[in-house]
Amino acid sequence: MNKKIVLLVALSLFVSYAYASEEKTPTWSQEEKHAPQDAKPGSYEDWCAEHGVPESKDTRCSPALIPAFKATKDWCKDHGLPKSQDLKCNPNLKIVRPPKEAAKGAK
């Protein structure tokens, strides 16, 4: 009987943890994941939420960018990413989204 109670408590804790984790996982539409086509490189809008890097430098979304990173020796062969974006090789690397620009005329 005690084993059944312990199992029931453990199962309910697992289910409640899984449910709580699911609620915190952000969900984005395809439009929210990627920068608009007219986003200025280096701006707040130039951001790929899916990969956490500027869209204008995102080789996973735009593989055509890869040769430029390789040409500048900014490429990790092991992970298939620019070294400047490779968090596995450089766990202390900080990739930060630029702040939103203040509206013109605002103080």
Image (cartoon, helix red, strand yellow):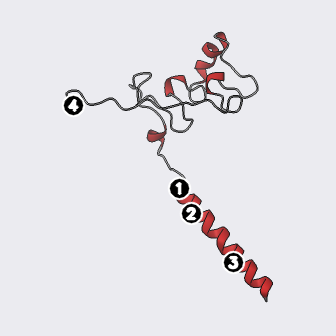
CA gap, disc 3 to disc 4? 55 Å
Counting other residues with Cα less than 10 Å from the Cα at mark 1, is it few (<14), some (14-19), or many (20 or more)?
A: few
Q: Is there CB contact under 8 Å for labels 2 and 1? A: yes
Mark 3 is surrounded, within 10 Å at the Cα level, by few (under 14), some (14 to 19) or many (20 or more) other residues, namely few
Residue nearest the viewer, comparing 86 with 46? 86
Task: Identify residue for label 2.
Answer: 20
Numbered tag placed on residue 9 in the rendering: 3
Q: Position of residue 35 (x, y in %)?
A: 44, 32
Q: Find disc 4 in the rendering and name its residue.
A: 106
Q: Secondary structure at mark 1?
A: helix
Q: Amino acid at mark 3?
A: Val
- Give how far across and how far down residue 9 sits, in percent: 69, 78
Image vertical order of residue 32 relative to residue 37, above or below = below
Image side of residue 28 versus residue 73, left or right? left
As drawn, the residue found furthest toward the left would be 105
The number of callouts visible is 4
In which quadrant will I find the N terminus? bottom right
Q: Amino acid at mark 2?
A: Ala
Image vertical order of residue 69 relative to residue 45, above or below: above
Amino acid type of disc 4?
A: Ala
- Under circle 4, the secondary element is loop
